[in-house]
């Protein structure tokens, strides 16, 4: 994977088709070669750790995920989003695309940041969860969806890849809609340990199959436990994951080595 970087980079884990980097996302992105990535999936901090409570496995638990999920102000959050989105644009190929997941806590900042940094939003995907945790406060409707924004460079020369016919066939011969319905991440995908915001594999399968081809390079700049990497490997893509948490990177290695 050395050809992906213009400056020396220390891999924490590397094979012929996978690379994991333990460190700062911004530093790693700045070392990557320009326009070297076919598809980016990002699950950035949602900044929802506000000392509140939620329900998990029938128990009342804190919503706090860790220091990485906290932010001091709205301005700081938006500045963070613009910076990493800007660096991602530099490494994305002209015909590549970026997918970013989020909730109401950060998705509006991300949408604005994408437009400010020169992207064109293609779709607003709604992930509808069939088994969301109940709302314990009973002061609002149950939160049962997340949003995934799909965007490309806002450039006349850019023509994002979309495997339209494949996704139509996958959907029983009907055009696939922008609402994807399914359960939360099952226990079977957490056998080596779990990440607090781990996404289910079927969600990444849709994304990777829709917007990349076999052999393409997939980048996840906030990889966590590397569901992106697991699915990329299953679908015969190359994968680069970046995370600053050693525990999560070790979990990524365990999951990748199971395949």
Image: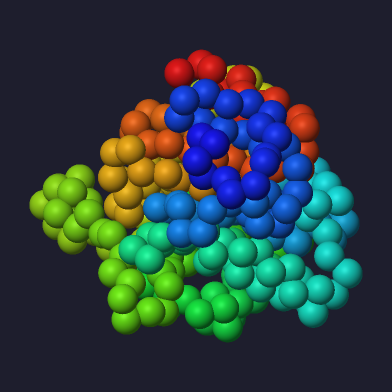
Left or right of residue 70, residue 237 in this image: left
User: Quarter of the image holding residue 47?
Assistant: bottom right
| Closer-to-camera residue (81/176) | 81
Of the pair 94 and 124, the residue shown nearer to us: 94
Q: Position of residue 224 (x, y in %)?
A: 65, 40
Furthest residue in direction left, as rendered: 173
Q: How is the image coloured?
A: rainbow
| Closer-to-camera residue (51/29) | 29
Q: Residue at x 41, y 69 (%)?
A: 152
Looking at the image, residue 23 sits to the left or right of residue 120; the answer is right
Spot occupied by residue 251 in the image (x, y as percentages of width and height): 66, 26
Residue at x-position 32% and y-position 54%: 211
Q: Is residue 148 above or below residue 156?
A: above
Q: Is residue 16 left or right of residue 74?
A: left
Question: Where on the picture, by quarter, is residue 77?
Answer: bottom right
Q: Position of residue 13 (x, y in %)?
A: 63, 26
Residue appearing at x 42%, y 44% in the figure: 217
Q: Nearer the viewer, residue 75 or 37?
A: 37
Image quadrant in which the C terminus is located: top left
Q: Compared with residue 73, is residue 219 higher up or lower down, i.e. above or below?
A: above
| Image quarter of residue 198 | top right
Visible residue check, residue 197: no
The residue most toward the front is 7
Kindly tell me whether residue 105 is visible in this rendering: yes
Judge left or right: residue 26 versus residue 4: right
């Amino acid at each position: 994977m050395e050809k992906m970087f213009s400056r020396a980079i220390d891999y924490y884990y590397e094979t012929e088709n996978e690379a994991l980097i333990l460190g700062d996302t911004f530093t790693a992105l700045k070392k990557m070669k320009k326009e070297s990535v076919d598809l980016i999936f990002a699950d950035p901090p949602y900044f929802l750790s506000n000392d509140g409570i939620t329900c998990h496995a029938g128990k009342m638990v804190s919503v706090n995920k860790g220091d990485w999920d906290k932010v001091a102000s709205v301005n700081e959050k938006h500045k963070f989003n613009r910076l990493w989105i800007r660096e991602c644009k530099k490494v994305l190929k002209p015909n590549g695309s970026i997918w970013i997941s989020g909730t109401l806590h950060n998705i509006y900042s991300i949408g604005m940041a994408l437009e400010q940094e020169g992207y064109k939003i293609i779709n607003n995907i709604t992930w509808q969860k069939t088994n969301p945790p109940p709302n314990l406060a009973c002061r609002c409707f149950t939160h049962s969806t997340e949003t995934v924004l799909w965007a490309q460079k806002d450039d006349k020369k850019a023509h994002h890849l979309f495997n339209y016919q494949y996704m139509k066939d996958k959907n029983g011969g009907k055009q696939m809609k922008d609402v994807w319905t399914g359960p939360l991440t099952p226990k079977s995908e957490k056998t080596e340990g779990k990440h607090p915001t781990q996404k289910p594999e079927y969600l990444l399968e849709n994304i990777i199959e829709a917007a990349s081809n076999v052999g393409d390079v997939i980048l996840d700049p906030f990889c966590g436990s590397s569901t992106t990497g697991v699915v990329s490997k299953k679908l015969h893509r190359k994968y680069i994951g970046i995370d600053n948490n050693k525990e999560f990177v070790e979990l990524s290695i365990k999951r990748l080595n199971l395949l």
